[in-house]
Amino acid sequence: ENEFVGCQCGIMDQLVSALGLEGHAMLLDCRSLTFQDAPIPDGMVILVVNSNVQRGLVDSEYNARRQQCEEVARILNVPALRDVSLEQLNGAKKNLSQEQYRRARHVVSENTRTIAAMTAMKINDIKTLGSLMDLSHDSLRDDYEVTTKELDGLVFIIKSVINDAGGVRMTGGGFGGCVVALIPAELEQAVIAAVEAQYSSQFGLEAEIYRCHASTGAFRAVNRNYV
């Protein structure tokens, strides 16, 4: 994908497809390729909602965002932004442009949120997990600037139904595509009805809604070393 398509994506999608675990999310260390499993909270449903805003990751600013983050890492003299704390980033702010700072702040804060989300899932703390998802979308919108008005609209519509009983955020490379929502099972039909009633009339597009379930990856299913 990096070499032939020209999209500087990472290993996450491929690895979780191979080594995911039924009913669990995965926390992946992209440097060491080690991972941890965390159970999807009880009574919750995962909905993926396609905005049907089409984007080509190569033609979008997806690669530019990665280049911006790599440049900040060079300025800070670290291998990657995962090696920087928010305090260190703030201390180096004078050496960065406002845009560079915002891009890096998203990555640094998102790493912190991701680890916190793993902890919340392990103790079934849905309120904290939902809040972390909401903060993630805010950061993707304001600091990383990869959302669209349609994605933001879907997040608003869904959040208006679930409030603090779950979370919703953009997923994927941005500039179109999907949002992912973690919602109580009893609110599933209300969320679907709200999206169907409001999204098309506001944005002139039809959303596609998928009820998803975390399943065991292809390699893990046949290799007991990963059970």
Image: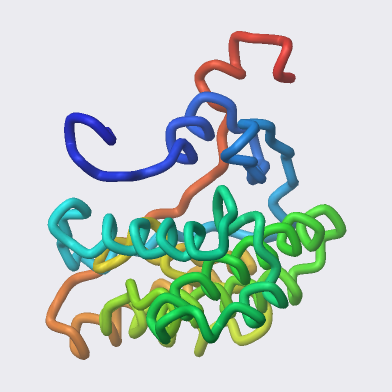
In this rendered view, identify the residue nearer to me: 170 or 6: 6
Q: How is the image coloured?
A: rainbow
Indicate the position of residue 82 as horizontal and vertical percent values: 62, 55
Indicate the position of residue 129 as horizontal and vertical percent values: 70, 69
Indicate the quadrant containing the C terminus: top left, top right, bottom left or bottom right: top right
Who's the residue at 66% across and 55% down the image?
83
Location of residue 124 by image quarter? bottom right
Location of residue 111 by image quarter? bottom right
- Is 74 rendered above or below residue 198? above
In this rendered view, identify the residue nearer to me: 95 or 108: 95
- Is 44 rendered above or below residue 12? below
Number of marks drawn: 0
Location of residue 166 by image quarter? bottom right
In this rendered view, identify the residue nearer to me: 77 or 56: 77
Residue 194 seen in the current view: no
Residue 25 seen in the current view: yes
Indicate the position of residue 223 as horizontal and vertical percent values: 64, 9
Indicate the position of residue 132 as horizontal and vertical percent values: 65, 73
Who's the residue at 63% across and 82% down the image?
90
Who's the residue at 82% across and 53% down the image?
122
Q: Residue furthest right?
A: 123
In this rendered view, identify the residue nearer to me: 93 or 204: 93
Who's the residue at 61% across and 19% down the image?
220
Query: Is 169 left, or right, of 53 in this rendering?
Result: right
- Is 13 rendered above or below residue 121? above
Indicate the quadrant containing the N terminus: top left, top right, bottom left or bottom right: top left
